[in-house]
Image (cartoon, rainbow, N blue to C red):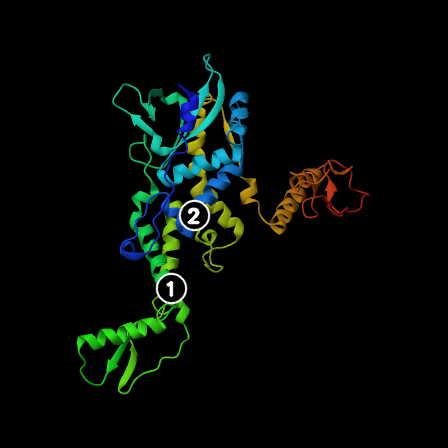
Amino acid sequence: MALADLIANLFRRNYSTTLLTGSAMSVPTVGPLSALRYTPVYRAVTLISGDIARLDCELSAPVADTLWRNPSTWWNAFEFRRALMMNALLYGNGFALINRTKGGELLELFLLDNDNVSLDVTRGTPTYTIRGYPDIPASDVLHVRAPSTSGLWGESPINLCRTSIQILASQEQMALTAYQNAGNPKIAIIHQRQIDEALMQKVENYYMKRHGGAENAGKPVVLGDGVKIERISSTVDDTGLEAARRYSIGDVSRLYGVPASYLSENVGSSYGSMEWLSRMYVDGCLQAWMSALASELRSKLMSPFDSVVWDTDALIRPGIAEQMAALRTGVEGGFLTRNEARARLDLEPLEGLDEPTLALNVGTGGGSTNIGEDTSESEGTPNDF
């Protein structure tokens, strides 16, 4: 394979999107990439991909671990993982070419554009085609899939749940249209007598010229004799736009498994502590993607018996008060030493704190004591850690 030609074709995706203006505003067109224009989708996708990219991931196979931490000269590890996951979250599939030596040794990983990749399942084993380069074995393509019924090709969450995203797009369009007119409601101009069509058009044009658009907001309305104005629709606030947008944020939350409060929705205190939210996010969202990625890494870069370990402590670490209470319980119960507790807090060990202790209600008298010590003449010592 001509690797230089392949790299030259990596970035041919058309990133242009159609703005919601003019006649195109009737039904917003939503696709995997254009869905990023809507802030709840952007937040969910970048949050998941960014967290997967920043978590420490240790591969037990040394060569594969080195490659995973330094995939190529084109991408650093963070950008490579984030882009791979964003493709999977938006398009349903994230691809990377595994470049090897003629002897089969791992060299580099190259991100692939989804538009360039197709899968051939008509043969005995699946093979990939990458923009004119056919018959690439599955073992040479790292393929992260979104959920699908086939298990071979992921389904785009945006395409599957397009209606929900179109509702969100329509709300953005509605807000844009309303605020372009400074949030003014629709009105009826009523004359006390019957007027012909030409005069009606003239009155309408006069009103729109003087009061249409944000630049005319606040101008006084001067009415002629026998003319009055009545409002026939509600303002932006009265239309329930805020409630509708909360509903759409909830839909995006359900689509990607991200807690609604992580998408900047004001959900109050009923959702519990941040530690509980973080655990729900890791267990209900990230864990599935980490497992999918780990399975692919074991299948393509390592042996099935190697391990992939994700360190999620940075995401679900509780607050300092909860940590101190848990460590105190461990120290007073005798199954953590005070220096071990200090290590959990990233503190340096202190001399004399390597022995386990027992709390007053567990020990034989006086206060917290070191296990195995003669406590008949000793006084209680505080659990300093």
Along the viewing direction, whichever of 256 and 6 lies nearer the viewer:
6
Percent across and percent down for residue 340 are 68, 37
Q: Within the image, what quadrant is residue 210 found in?
A: bottom left
User: Would you say the residues marked 1 and 2 are in contact, meaning their CB atoms lie under 8 Å apart?
Assistant: no
Percent across and percent down for residue 122 are 25, 22
The residue that disc 1 covers is 180
Q: Within the image, what quadrant is residue 120 found in?
A: top left
Q: How many marks?
A: 2
Along the viewing direction, whichever of 266 and 317 lies nearer the viewer:
266
Percent across and percent down for residue 65 are 53, 25
Give the crowd class for mark 1: few <14, some 14-19, many >=20 residues within 10 Å. Answer: some
Farthest-out residue, right: 377
Question: What label sits on residue 42 in the rendered view?
Answer: 2
How many angstroms separate mark 1 from mark 2 (CA)? Answer: 24 Å
Residue 276 horizontal side relative to residue 26, left or right? right
Q: Quadrant of the N terminus?
A: top left
The amino acid beneath tag 2 is: Tyr
Percent across and percent down for residue 209 are 33, 71
* Residue 351 to residue 188: above or below: above
The amino acid beneath tag 1 is: Gln
Nearer the N terminus, badge 1 or badge 2?
Answer: 2
* Residue 243 to residue 332: above or below: below
Farthest-out residue, top: 103
What residue is at 54 percent from the left and 44 percent from the top? 316
What residue is at 39 percent from the left and 54 percent from the top? 249
Any part of residue 304 in sight: no
Any part of residue 23 in sight: yes
Residue 150 horizontal side relative to residue 354, left or right? left
Question: What label sits on residue 34 in the rendered view?
Answer: none
